[in-house]
């Protein structure tokens, strides 16, 4: 597994949440030459690949985020999502999405820093 998926503090994933998945796919493949791979994960999810390597994903806005404009989100690898969630509150942040599991992927949460910037923390499931 690539070190960005295993080491604390590494940016590891980018994800587009959008209201028009098909338009986004057309735009970004045309703009950057990315290739796409459909990856059903209990929801429709598209892997974004550059030079054959998965670098991110595209998905429709989930029900709990309706009304939020489309955005690219960043994920940072952490050793313990639950501890990071708690620490973010101690440091004056806010938990927007409490820690939860992504089947076959790992565990994540979404936090907001005291200035309002949003970022996700994730611990990836180790494949054996």
Image (cartoon, rainbow, N blue to C red):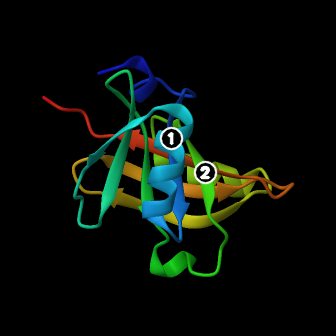
Whether residue 82 can be seen here: no
Q: Residue at x 83, y 55 (%)?
A: 114
Q: Residue at x 54, y 49 (%)?
A: 27
Label 2: which secondary element:
strand
Say which of 73 and 38 sits in front: 38
Say which of 99 and 23 sits in front: 23
Q: Residue at x 34, y 51 (%)?
A: 46
Q: Position of residue 109 (x, y in %)?
A: 51, 56
Q: Position of residue 35 (x, y in %)?
A: 36, 36
* Left or right relative to 41: residue 122: right
- Res 89 → quadrant: bottom right
- Res 53 → quadrant: top left
Q: Position of residue 23 (x, y in %)?
A: 49, 61
Q: Position of residue 116 (x, y in %)?
A: 81, 58
Quadrant showing the C terminus: top left
Label 1: which secondary element:
helix
Mark seen at residue 72: 2
Q: How many marks?
A: 2
Q: Residue at x 87, y 54 (%)?
A: 115
Mark seen at residue 30: 1
Q: Residue furthest right?
A: 115
Say which of 101 and 1 sits in front: 1
Mark seen at residue 120: none
How packed mark 1 is, by other alpha carbons closer than 10 Å (few <14, some 14-19, many 20 or more), is few
Marks 1 and 2: CB-CB under 8 Å? Answer: no
Q: Earlier in the sequence, mark 1 or mark 2?
A: 1
- Image vertical order of residue 57 relative to residue 111, above or below: above
């Amino acid at each position: 597994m690539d070190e960005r998926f295993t080491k604390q503090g590494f940016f590891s994933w980018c994800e587009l949440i959008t209201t028009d998945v098909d338009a986004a796919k057309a735009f970004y493949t045309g703009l950057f030459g990315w290739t796409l791979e459909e990856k059903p994960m209990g929801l429709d999810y598209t892997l974004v690949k550059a030079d054959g390597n998965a670098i991110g994903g595209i998905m429709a806005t989930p029900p709990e985020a309706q009304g939020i404009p489309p955005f690219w989100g960043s994920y940072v690898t952490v050793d313990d999502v639950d501890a990071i969630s708690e620490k973010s509150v101690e440091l004056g942040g806010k938990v927007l999405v409490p820690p939860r599991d992504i089947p076959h992927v790992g565990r994540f949460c979404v936090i907001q820093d005291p200035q309002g910037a949003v970022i996700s923390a994730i611990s990836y499931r180790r494949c054996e």
